[in-house]
Amino acid sequence: MHLLHPDPIQAAETLAALLEKEAVYARGDYLTSFTLCDHGPGVSADDRLLLVNWMYSVANQCEFKRETTAVAMELVDRFLSSCPPKASHFYLADRENFQLLAVAAFYVSVKTMERVAFGSDLLALVSNGTYTKEEIERTEKELLHGLGWKVNPPTAMQFACLIMSLVTPHIAMHDELVVRVLDETAYQAESSVRDINLSRERSSSIAVAAIFNAAYQLLESGIRQEFLLALSCILVCDSIGNFAHPKELQSAATQASAALEVSAVCRALDGFGPPMTNDAQHGTVFTSSQDEQTLDTRSLNDELRDVRRQLQASTSFMDVS
């Protein structure tokens, strides 16, 4: 459930702080850069999509926040956008190494975002022995050092809730409609994580684009005009901070809508939407020529069924950067 901030003044101050913080968490187009260097095929956007779906499936099984997956992929994308060429080649030339980085990032994200965390030994189990506990922990350390321990990025839904907290006091929207707009915004923000092109966009831009699309889908013309006017006032307010240029926001909105087509296919991984094939439901990621699964959420049914009850809350969370 996504909650609005009760105090618009504090919401505006928090939004301004997140916009300033967001500049530190910039990401680049690492897949295109790697391909242009003629390293061979390596990891593709489809490979990244498979890993995002796997993370969402694990998060769903463990009843984790949806944003835990978004943060994990932000860590992966940002690390690969800024790491030395040697590390970039190691993780992008081989899909299993890319998987290992994603597993380590998910491990970090769970410890940062969740009150209940599972250990690296359990992640090693989920990977069907593909990676050892030591490999995951070693990769975690490399990831943390590469990111300068900045592991708490602003998320699209953090921005969205703050923006909606500033918009709704000026619009005659009943609570049920506000919830529907937030839910649709969350769905589009979640879908954007799957799209490599949107991974380069600012989280605030994803939030604005998702709200914009949700307003056009759910609001009638009269209230929609009032809503978009209030939203526009926030975007140009100097006291809040600098959002992306309107053309960039429009581009993000268009891409977010397109990402829904992919997400409509993948949504069943998380218990939504129509049934999928068995392979998709089980969350198979990369397979060898012998169809040996390297990451398979089928083991979660037995090993992680009671994970939230069995595992103790982590008492040593990472510092907020």
Image (cartoon, rainbow, N blue to C red):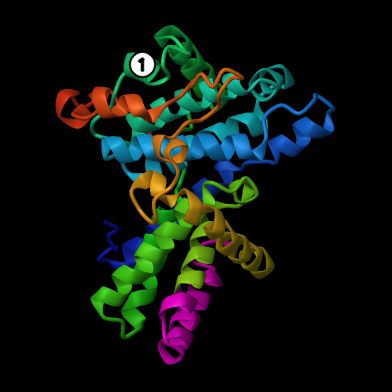
Decide whether residue 240 is among the magenta residues: yes
- Which residue is at the front of the view, 299 or 102? 299
221 lies left or right of 146: left
Most foreground residue, 30 or 52 = 52
The reply to whether the magenta stretch includes residue 111 is no
Q: Report the span colored magenta.
A: 215-244
Q: Looking at the image, which is closer to me, 219 or 13?
A: 219
Provide the residue designation for mark 1: 125
Q: Residue at x 71, y 20 (%)?
A: 89
Where does residue 62 sit, x and y in percent of width and height?
27, 35
Residue 101 locus on image (x, y percent): 53, 23
Residue 248 left/right relative to 100: right
Badge 1 crowding class, 10 Å Cα cut-off, few under 14, some 14 to 19, many 20 or more, is: some
Residue 152 is at least partly visible in this image: no
| Image quarter hosting the N terminus | bottom left
Residue 118 visible (yes or no): yes
Q: Is residue 185 left or right of residue 204?
A: left
Measured as percent of width and height from the top left, residue 54 is found at 45, 35
Q: Nearer the viewer, residue 275 or 88?
A: 275
Q: Is residue 267 above or below residue 153?
A: below
Q: Amino acid at mark 1?
A: Leu
- Please tell me which residue is depicted at 67% across the width and 25% down the height of the picture: 92
Overall secondary structure of the magenta stretch? helix
Q: Residue at x 22, y 27 (%)?
A: 307
Element at label 1: helix
Residue at point 60%, 61% (across, down): 258
Residue extending furthest toward the bottom: 222
Q: Is residue 141 above or below residue 111?
A: above
